[in-house]
Image (spheres, rainbow, N blue to C red):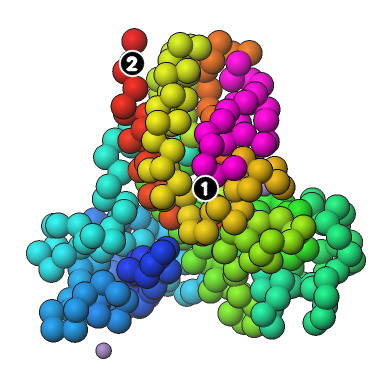
Amino acid sequence: MTKYKLEYIWLDGYKPTPSLRGKTQIKEFDHFPSLEELPLWGFDGSSTEQAEGRSSDCVLMPVALYPDPARKNGALVMCEVMMPDGVTPHVTNARATILDDEGAWFGFEQEYFFYKDGRPLGFPEHGYPSPQGPYYTGVGYKNVGDIAREIVEEHLELCLEAGINHEGINAEVAKGQWEFQIFGKGSKRAADEVWMARYLLQRLTEKYGIDIEYHCKPLGDTDWNGSGMHCNFSTKYLREVGGKEYFEALMAAFEKNLDDHIAVYGPDNHLRLTGKHETAPWNKFSYGVADRGASIRVPHSFVRNDYKGYLEDRRPNSQGDPYKIASQVLKTISEVELK
Ligand code: ADP
Ligand code: MN
Ligand code: MN
Ligand code: MN
Ligand code: MN
């Protein structure tokens, strides 16, 4: 028998957007356990904005499992938060609101800043570094500094070893800003992996004395880019049937549900979706072929392929909850009739 270190990870009840929490339990198995073998567990919800002090137990239900590449005999266990009965989803459990996941593919582009001493990594103590331009996909000390790439590479390696489906990484437009992309067949799968990649990034950077800043506009109203989390999505129907008429009906539904989308696309998004810095104004829905200034970018290949393929909603921000984002995208899609 081996004593496994099981890190149960969940989302707390913090508003306007949840944070990651995790705690370890040790269990003996004679093999690396499967998801089905992992027991329910509990935590004190009064410390995470998920319960009152008097009746504070919340239940952790394992829903996804990854080997923990940084820990001997370790496993990372993504959990949904349930009520004490163990079957009713807690009100903060957005994963449980994803109803129909079948055939849905999601790709999230997570942008973020490294922060040290209250400012982006590589910013001088006073003032700003030289303006944006050379940093996006840049190389060299003056563009990316001396430590960011080391962390990014270490994070990528951890994620790949954990089985997270990274599709790529790049340095972003602002100094100290980076991106990783995660693709998954099944929105829950993709969103679980985004949260787990965030967890691994935050845990990794502890030892560097660096924090991850997910806020969508950490440098406020300046000429420094904000951070997004573009949501690329497709359904089986969109990939295999599609068509101009269906596409236009889908875009009409996205326009009609604008407020519901913006409500879950991450806090303070009006600061980022201004119409500048490759964004569309938050309060006006638009779509356009290859248009990075539209709410939804329609890839060239989509039009060429008789309106089949995937679409990119560019509005979700870096601090958004991918469960809520996917849930709303799928809800809007479900409102459009299939031919
Ligand atoms: P860009 O920065 O130009 O917007 P990226 O390469 O960073 O593009 O991200 C594109 C994303 O689109 C990738 O994460 C990829 O996984 C995703 N994607 C590609 N094909 C599909 C598809 N059929 N359904 C959903 N997402 C897709
Ligand atoms: Mn205790
Ligand atoms: Mn990208
Ligand atoms: Mn980007
Ligand atoms: Mn994009």
Query: Which label sits in the foreground, 2 or 1?
Result: 1
Q: What span is in magenta? A: 281-303
The magenta stretch spans residue 233: no
Residue at 55% x, 53% y: name it. Answer: 270
Specify whether 178 is left or right of 204: right
Depth order, front residue of 83/156: 83
Residue at 40% x, 27% y: name it. Answer: 253
Tag 1 residue: 316
Residue neighbourhood size for the residue with mark 2, other residues' Cα within 10 Å, grouped as few (<14), some (14–19), many (≥20): few
Tag 2 residue: 338
Q: Give residue 139's quadrant in the image.
A: bottom right
Q: What is the secondary structure assignment of the residue under circle 1?
A: loop
| Residue 185 image offset from top left, x and y in percent | 44, 37
> Residue type at mark 1?
Pro
Depth order, front residue of 215/105: 215
Residue at 30% x, 44% y: name it. Answer: 98
Residue neighbourhood size for the residue with mark 1, other residues' Cα within 10 Å, grouped as few (<14), some (14–19), many (≥20): many
Residue extending farthest front: 283
Residue at 54% x, 54% y: name it. Answer: 269
Q: CA distance from mark 2 to mark 1?
A: 26 Å
Q: Is residue 86 above or below residue 1?
A: above
Depth order, front residue of 334/239: 334
Q: What is the secondary structure assignment of the residue under circle 2?
A: loop
Depth order, front residue of 250/107: 250
Q: Is mark 2 within 8 Å of ligand 1?
A: no
| Residue 143 image offset from top left, x and y in percent | 86, 62
